[in-house]
Image (spheres, coloured by chain):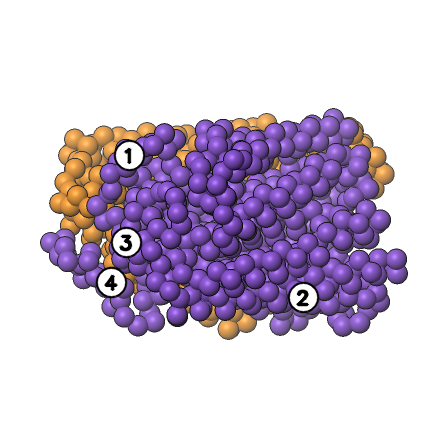
Amino acid sequence: MSEQTLTLDDHEHHEHGPAKGLLRWVFTTNHKDIGTLYLIFSLTMFFIGGMMAMVIRAELFQPGLQLVEPGFFNQMTTMHGLIMVFGAVMPGFVGLANWQIPLMVGAPDMALPRMNNWSFWILPFAFTMLLSTLFMDGGAPDFGWTFYAPLSTTYAPPSVTFFIFAIHMMGISSIMGAMNIIVTLFNMRAPGMSLMQMPMFAWSWLITAFLLVAVMPVLAAVVTMMLMDIHFATSFFSAAGGGDPVLFQHIFWFFGHPEVYIMILPAFGVVSQILPTFSRKPLFGYHSMVYALIAIAILSFVVWAHHMFTVGMPIGGQLFFMYSTMLIAVPTGVKIFNWVATMFKGSLSFETPMLFAVAFVVLFTIGGFSGIMLAIAPIDFQYQDTYFVVAHFHYVLVPGAVFGIVAGVYYWLPKWCGKMYDESLGKTHFWLSFIGLNLTFFPMHFVGLAGMPRRIPDYSLQFADFNMMASMGAFLFGASQLVFVYLVIKAIRSGEKAAQVPWESAEGLEWTLPTPLPYHTFTTPPVFESKL
Amino acid sequence: MEHSSDEYYVPDQSIWPIVGAIAMFLMLGGTGSALIDLQNSEHISLSSSIIMYSGMAILIFMLFGWFGNVIEESRRGAYSAQVDISFRYGMTWFIFSEVMFFLAFFGVLYYARTFSVPWLGGEGDKGISHMLWPDFVATWPLLTPPNPELFMPIKEVIDPWHLPLINTILLVTSSFTVTFAHHALRHGERAKIKIWLAITLVFGIIFLGLQAEEYIEAYQQLDLTLNSGIYGATFFLLTGFHGLHVTIGSIILFILLIRVIKGHFTPDNHFGFEAGSWYWHFVDVVWLLLFVVVYVF
């Protein structure tokens, strides 16, 4: 079934549906299949990484060492971070991109469909390799998701070698996935759709894909140098040979800071699609939204050392990175005000996607504010490596990135599977998640400001109450994600048939297609008429 | 350009991506366990090498199969002008990602020369680190690392005006010869294509031979090794990854030569050739930068 049997005259080929059997999912070149694979993979990783978070919160439920060894605790924090970043959030957004970008720009598929399949299928192997380190001698990586040298070189467990190769595979997958998206958006838009008429989700992914192609090779380079230091006696990150451990941090964060925008820009895109629909108004300030995205992307390359204020940096460097970081608040503020202006005087209704999108705007802004606090170099000396940092990045990642993905799934699920989900279950999922995550992460601000260090399995007695609250919130948040799984399965199996446009006043090419979607769409490009 | 279809060509199912993913998993997993074997004992275990080499073999099998499909589809005329543009954009962004990969290594070299080595020598903002090794004198090229017991001193560095200069001339010339081959291809002069492409390939192989000779000289006579501190580390990483890319480029040129001999390319439809030559030019540009900042200055 693998061989290419089609001949060009065989036009009927394009009409037929998916191949039979489970192997269809392995050999597929269809963007919808691959999008589904990415989303299922992302959800699986979300639960695996989530279980690790549960271990962390269970250990931190009370002061003292109760459940796990401190070494294992370190493995849990490390693996939780790596899996959530590379396994849950990034593939989640690529899944949305795979499903939606061809539908939104009127393309028959992704530009390079076979490479698209490869991008996905590398991931299960990469994560098999990464997760297998948990069962190796010396345990899994335990040096934090930022894997600073020399913790990750001189003092690392032997499994670090497999960690390095797993990162290489994830990098190759991401680069190919990003290239595919760039090529699709540049080359496959429906005739008549200029770049400045693309839907915001497509724009956000174009910028994200550019960031990915630019910084994933830098990540590959830094893990390669780690590999050399560990196995080939080089001294990139050893001062004894003229290198510098701080050099590791510079290269890592040159990748790492654009990486955090890679994890949030597509969520900006999703929210920019959802808010206009449920406000029954066009997006406010489309052009400024696009320019803000571009500005954020450019600035993301010149702010990396704000992650390193306390390692010892010349005062000039601290000032530069402090001001450049605070500058990012300007384009981000433009986006937040535009979202608010989109809703202003709109005819709002609060279906589940809208609930998640509105929560995104509010809670992401809290994460943004704590980010500005952390950007101020003298203040950062107090916050560095405390739970305040943990609170900050979980506020941008959970109600930011994760809510972005979930909102997108609720918004487009009726189009993908042709069935409506259960609205009251959706609202239940939202409210449980909303309460759970705020209960988890909001107290972390206070314990962080009071000096509780991150990545430590024990804490001082005065932090006990807030930590217990955070743990209960985490268990609630974790459990409420099961509602989501149940809801999706229920929608696919027995949901009510969805209308072609399930949302009043939803706009875009994807809604011009019939529901349920045919296996191949837009085999001949649609005519795009601009409303701008 | 001949295109027999107006529709964008969306290939049917393909076995090759999953074969490639398995190959990558075996190759990297095998390499990883081989490296850990070497850490624990002096030799690589049989199982590690079997996994590693079978991964490589499957990868080669996959490349033949996948590219074979693409070539067959291209020659059948399945690719419209729009597909051709997709390939062009794809290759461009691939090369851009390679540029970023090398940029990181050049950045390391810059950082070592501008910051870490002078700091360890007592200069600049973090000159206090001089107290770690008070006898250390900062120089570039860094012949004696701060701790000469952990990282071996170098006797001498490579003379840029000997082998590296010859290599520079070879690679720059080969960038021209591959362009001559492309011109010949556009004019349909098959004999000339073969000659110019063969010359390019020969230059690439001579480059690799000279590079190997330089490495042997470095290890045997100059004590310049991976273990000789940041100079040796950056030297071998930059030239080594460049050499790897020349190797890949030479393999690409070799395949292109075979395809020219088989008559695969037409004056209007030869993107495979162009992609190969773009890659070769990229390798050339990296070398020029490398020659200047690694060898000369």
- Residue that mark 4 sits on: A17
Q: What's the CA distance linking mark 2 and mark 3?
A: 40 Å
Q: Are marks 4 and 1 on the same chain?
A: yes
Mark 3 or 4, nearer chain start: 4
Mark 3: which amino acid? Pro
Chain letter belonging to callout 1: A
Q: Is residue A33 left or right of residue A131?
A: left
Q: Are marks 2 and 4 on the same chain?
A: yes
Chain letter belonging to callout 4: A
- Residue at the spot 21% in from the left edge and 61% down from the top edge: A16
Q: Is residue B30 left or right of residue B219?
A: left
Q: What's the CA distance linking mark 2 and mark 4?
A: 42 Å
What secondary structure is found at the residue carrying circle 2?
A: helix
Q: Is residue A530 left or right of residue B38?
A: left
- Residue that mark 1 sits on: A529
Q: Which mark is residue A475?
A: 2
Which x, y percent locates residue B173?
A: 36, 30
Which x, y percent locates residue B92?
A: 38, 37
Mark 4: which amino acid? Gly
Q: Is residue A16 left or right of residue A187?
A: left
Asked whether residue B51 appears in the rendered view, the answer is yes
Mark 2: which amino acid? Phe
What secondary structure is found at the residue carrying circle 4?
A: loop
Q: Which chain is orange?
A: B
- Residue that mark 3 sits on: A514
Pick out the residue farthest to the right: A461
Chain letter belonging to callout 3: A
